[in-house]
Every structure is written in structure tokens, then in C-alpha cells.
Amino acid sequence: MTGGRLVRLAESARAPVEFIFDGEALTGLEGDTVLTAILLSRRALRDAEFGPEARAGFCLMGACQDCWVWQEGGARLRACSTPLREGMRLRSAPGGTQWPGPPADAERDRSGDSA
Amino acid sequence: MTRVLIIGAGPAGIRAAETLAAAGLNPVVVDEAARAGGQIYRRPPEGFTRTPEKLYGSEAAKARALHATFDRLVAEGKVTHLPQRSVMALHGGTAHVLGETRQEIPYDRLIVATGATDRLAPVPGWQAGGVYSLGAAQIALKAQGVALGRRIVLAGSGPLLTLLATQLVASGAEVAAVLDTAPMRQQVRGGLRMALARPWVTLRGLRLRAALGRRYHAGVTLTGIESDATGPTAMAWRDAKGRDRRTDCDTVGLGWHLRSDGTIADLAGAAFDWDTDFAQWLPRADPLGRAGEGLYLAGDGLRILGADGAELAGRAAATACLQDLGLPHPDPARTLRRLGRMHRFAQGMMQAFPWPAQMVRDLPDTATVCRCEGISAGDLRGTLPLSGPEANRAKSLGRVGMGRCQGRYCQLAGAEIIAAAAGSAPRDVGRLRAQPPARPAPIGAWLNTPAEGEAE
């Protein structure tokens, strides 16, 4: 099956919101969560770290943490409870810096200096 | 003024806030959602247009009243609402709260109304993306207007199974099958107790069930979820007569009623007892919800009585708080009587729609128990000769309960498997201790930012 996992059943008359997921331009609607917006175009949010399967969220109430996605800047989001915002740049996997530390911008500046 | 902190803005937290505000206190309510209401009365984002009647059906008037009460209290400045924040830890009378920023909120009295999550039993293959909790499917429908798939199988047991199935069908989703693990005979026995306590509510449930027609099957055993790279492709199950069946689908919803989320109550110092009726650990409290010095519990996090019971329990907990402060308070007699009726109804419900203990005990070694870290029933069984039959030691060595859901969705199944191996019962296995942070949190939130004080 192609296309997204989710099916919109109601509330489709809302303003479109453009965002990027894994480098591709996708469109959601104002009021969508990040999870809703991604899964209307994709089958999954991310790959499982401990098994071969993909993951697409589980509880949708912020309790299971299955729906983590990442911003290109490095910050992790809970997709089920984060509202979609115009121009968000999201990834299905963490970027280069997985360890906690200074914000990603500072990280980039510093690695630029040392190069 | 006495600083009362309420954690959770569902039916219990809202009624607790209302009761305290009526006595002249100005409680602070912290909640994870953007808009108050809790899960069952969850509100869609601003700009959505479906009416409460469409969203909440027969419960629309209750939802409207609850939302209006809370919005009015906030607008009048009688309650301080801190939405989109998680309480991560409680220490020395201060709540450590994380949202866009980090906050430390000091309090004198604490009311915990953190509700419940779906109670999950593993089904072989449930780790596939596209398997959800029943609550997830309801939240998606209510708060986002979406179905989680094109052809959905709902399985488990409990009131939400039937309710969600009818809501999805009415909204135009394709529900391929509704598979209830509760045998019909048991449903009739528990159903009689439910009808004695709350006849109209029971009748409403039966009507919903009838609307599902041939989609609904009772006394089912779930044998496995088949998947390919895109997610589920079929649910394999055995019917009440022992015949193997298979239903094609691309999405599965699972849930066996609810599990009280005791994380915050535990961090606040509550004690817990195994409850035989509810088949889970529940915090210890007096009839009004007193659980310790300055600590009060209410709602599904205390006893799983549903939304009506949560409203009553919220009033009861706030009443206890006012009593202890020596302030004027409502007479709790009528609230306690009504709570008693809710409890009798809930006991009937637990009998009608039980936890599938045998199905969990019979899980094959290859079945995943911990979805977070892919730990199988065989891995857990293999840990037991080293750890012994105690939940916390088995967690330390085998990691069931240590992943990112912090044991919320595997703890009860893990205990059942440990008990089966030890020839004991889940209550003998012990309860996983809660540890802060109550949700996974980036350490950077503590490293880089000084905490703000209480929001004004």
C-alpha cells in the first residue's frame, strides 16, 4: 500500500501548513499534531532502535514515548503532542549530535571553528 | 494563602480546582495538554468545528459543563492554569515542571489527578508500527478527526472497545472486526452487577454493542499480529469455539480497560496495594482520597471509576484538603454515596471484562513483552533464574520496564509472566518503583536553563 497511514475523516477545512520531513516537503493542516501531519503522508515516524520494525506512535497521549522524531537542529519532539508549525524541519532519526549539550547552532559553530 | 497544586486537568482535577476556588483558594493546575479536559473529554485544537454532541455523544452536556467551568475559573483569575507542562519530580514541597521552559513550583498541599492509560497485554507482533492502544485511536478521532488506518481491527476488552468501535464506524472508518477476549458468560455475570449499580449506563453499553452486529466476537483468544514492512496485514485469532480465524487489516487497536498511572502518586509518597478487583496496583487512600500528609488523590489514578467517578473524586479530594486546612467545605456525604455506587459498577465491569491473565501467561518465548526495547517473553523468563521472581530485580537485569515508557505498558504483563514462572500471582511479584523524571527528559533542560518561579 502506498501513501500515508492515516485517513482524514473530518475537520479538513483548515489552512495548509508546509513542513519538511527527512528532506521532503510535506503539507499538513493548521491544528494537526506533528504525528498526524507526518502519518497522513507516510506509513511510519521512525525505525525501532531494538528491532527491524518501523514505529508510528502507540498511545497518542504522551505516555509511551514511541512517537519521538527530531528537529534538524537536534531537539527531540513527542510527535503526538507537538502542534505542527509552518516551516518545521523534522527528521525520523537523530542528527549528528545525539548527546545532550549546547543547542545545535552552537555545536555547528564550534565544529566550524575547529575545522 | 495556602498554595495547592493540582496535577492533571481532567474531570477530577477540574472539579477539585472548582471546589477549592469556591472556598477562596487559588489553586495552580499543571497539565500536559494544551486545553483542559483530560482524555475522555479531550478538546480538539482551536479552530476545529465539530460540536461536543458529535465528539462526546451522550456525554456532550457533561463535557460542555466541565470545559465551561474550567474556562470560567481561569478567566476570573480563580485558578492558575499551566498547560503543556509535565511534572517531572517532586522534592521538598516543590514540583519540578518541564514545558517550553523549566519551572519550580512550591506547594503546601498536593492533589494528584493524573488519570490512567490503556492497560495493555502483549500480543505476538504488537511491536509493529500501526499497532496502537485503543485510547490512541479515540484521541486521533476526537482531537484530530483522523482514523489511524484504512482497515482497523480492535481487540482487547472493556467499555472503550465497544464505544470506540461505534464511534469509528459512525465517523466513516472501516472497522473490520471487534475482538473481545472476555467470554460471554463472564460478561453476563459482571453485566448484572453493572446493571444493578447503574442500569442506564449499562443499557447504553448494550445498545452500542448491538450496533456493531457481526463485527463483534466475544471469548476470543488473540494469537498474533501479522505484519510486513509497512505495518500490520492481519490479526490472527481463535474464536470462542476454538476455530482459528484471520482478519485482514492495516491497523490494530489494543486495550484491556485502563491502568491507573501511579507514577506521580508514588513520587509524592503514596503507598500502594494490589487490588484484586482491578487486577493492578492502586494507591492507598481514605474514602475522600487522603494518601499522606498534605497529599490527596482523585480520579482514575486512584480508582478506575471513569469520568463520572472522577468528577466526584475530584470534589472529594478537594473537600478533604479543605477539611484538613480547617476551611469551610461541602458536606461529602452525598459525594461518597455516589462514589460507592460508581465503585460497585466498576467492580462489575472488571468482572465482565477481565485482564487476560492466561493469554499473557501462554505467550510464546518469541513474543515481545517490552515494546520500547524489543525484549521478549523468553528474554524475561531467561532472566528469572538470576533475578528471582521480583519485578524490580527482573527489571534491573532484564530491562522489562526500563525503556522509554518506563514500564507503563509492560509492567502488568511482565508481572504475570514472572508469576507464571514462579507459580505465584502478580501481587507476589511486587510493583515497579517509580523514579524521577516521570517522563524522559533531556538533561539539557537542567544544565542550560535556570528554573523560573511559579507563573503569575
Image (spheres, coloured by chain):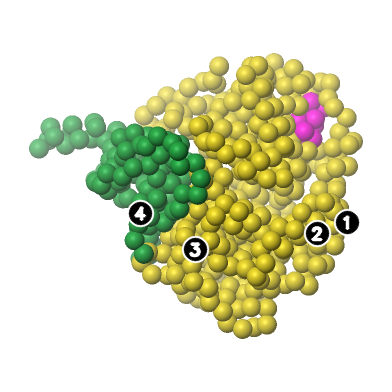
Callouts 2 and 3 close, C-beta under 8 Å: no
| Chain A shade in the render | green
Residue closest to the eye, A2 or B281: A2
**Which residue type does callout 4 highlight?**
Arg
The residue carrying pointer 4 sits among few (fewer than 14), some (14 to 19) or many (20 or more) residues within 10 Å by Cα, namely some
The picture quadrant where one finds residue B69 is top right
Is residue A51 left or right of A89 when viewed as pictured?
right
Q: Which residue is mark 1?
A: B196
Q: Which residue is mark 4?
A: A42
The answer to whether residue B169 is above or below residue B425 is above
Alpha carbon of mark 2 to alpha carbon of mark 3: how far? Answer: 32 Å
**Which residue type does callout 2 highlight?**
Gly
Q: Chain of mark 3?
A: B
Is residue B262 left or right of A71 when viewed as pictured?
right
Tag shown at residue B331: none
Q: Main secondary structure of the magenta part?
A: helix
